[in-house]
Each structure stands twice: as C-alpha cells, then as structure tokens.
Amino acid sequence: MALREIEAGTVTTDNINDLKVDIADLEQEFSEELSAEDLPQS
C-alpha cells in the first residue's frame, strides 16, 4: 500500500507517521522473536 501511495505521489505526513508506527511495531516483534530464540549476538 505504501509503495502505491509513493508512486501516486499521495504521500502525506499522516502516511509517513503511520509507516513509522508500523516500523516500530515490526522492530518490537522482531526483537521479541530474536530474544525468544536466544540467538548469539553478532
């Protein structure tokens, strides 16, 4: 969805803020999964 908005030139501050929230949620999920798997830190 985000890519289509960028291509269509309809990106707004609200869209970007939504993306930042989505990214933060993903980072949280990944960090939880990584710690749950107890992977060695590189």
Image: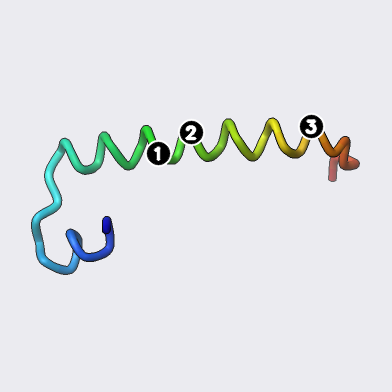
Q: Residue extending furthest bottom?
A: 7
Relative horizontal placement of residue 18, taking residue 36 as reference (left or right) = left
Q: Amino acid at mark 1?
A: Asp
Residue 28 sits in quarter: top right
The answer to whether the residue labelled 2 contacts the one labelled 1, judged by CB atoms less than 8 Å apart, is yes
Provide the secondary structure element on which disc 1 rests.
helix
Where, quadrant-wise, is the N terminus in this rendering?
bottom left
Q: Is residue 2 above or below residue 15?
A: below
What residue is disc 2 on? 25
Relative horizontal placement of residue 15, taking residue 10 as reference (left or right) = right
Q: State the image coordinates of residue 41 (x, y, percent, origin top left).
A: 85, 40
Spatial separation of the CA atoms under disc 3 and disc 1: 20 Å
What residue is disc 3 on? 35
Residue 36 sits in quarter: top right
**Comes first in the chain, label 3 or label 1:** 1
Instruction: Please name the residue shown 14% across and 51% down the image.
Output: 11
Residue 6 sits in quarter: bottom left
The answer to whether the residue labelled 2 contacts the one labelled 3, judged by CB atoms less than 8 Å apart, is no
Where, quadrant-wise, is the C terminus in this rendering?
top right
Q: Circle 1: is it few (<14), some (14-19), or many (20+) Cα within 10 Å?
A: few
Q: Circle 2: is it few (<14), some (14-19), or many (20+) Cα within 10 Å?
A: few
Relative horizontal placement of residue 29, taking residue 3 as reference (left or right) = right
Q: Amino acid at mark 2?
A: Asp
**Comes first in the chain, label 2 or label 3:** 2
What residue is disc 1 on? 22
Q: Amino acid at mark 3?
A: Ser
Provide the secondary structure element on which disc 2 rests.
helix
Provide the secondary structure element on which disc 3 rests.
helix
Relative horizontal placement of residue 30, taking residue 39 as reference (left or right) = left
Q: Which mark is residue 36?
A: none
Q: Is residue 8 above or below residue 14?
A: below
Colour option used: rainbow
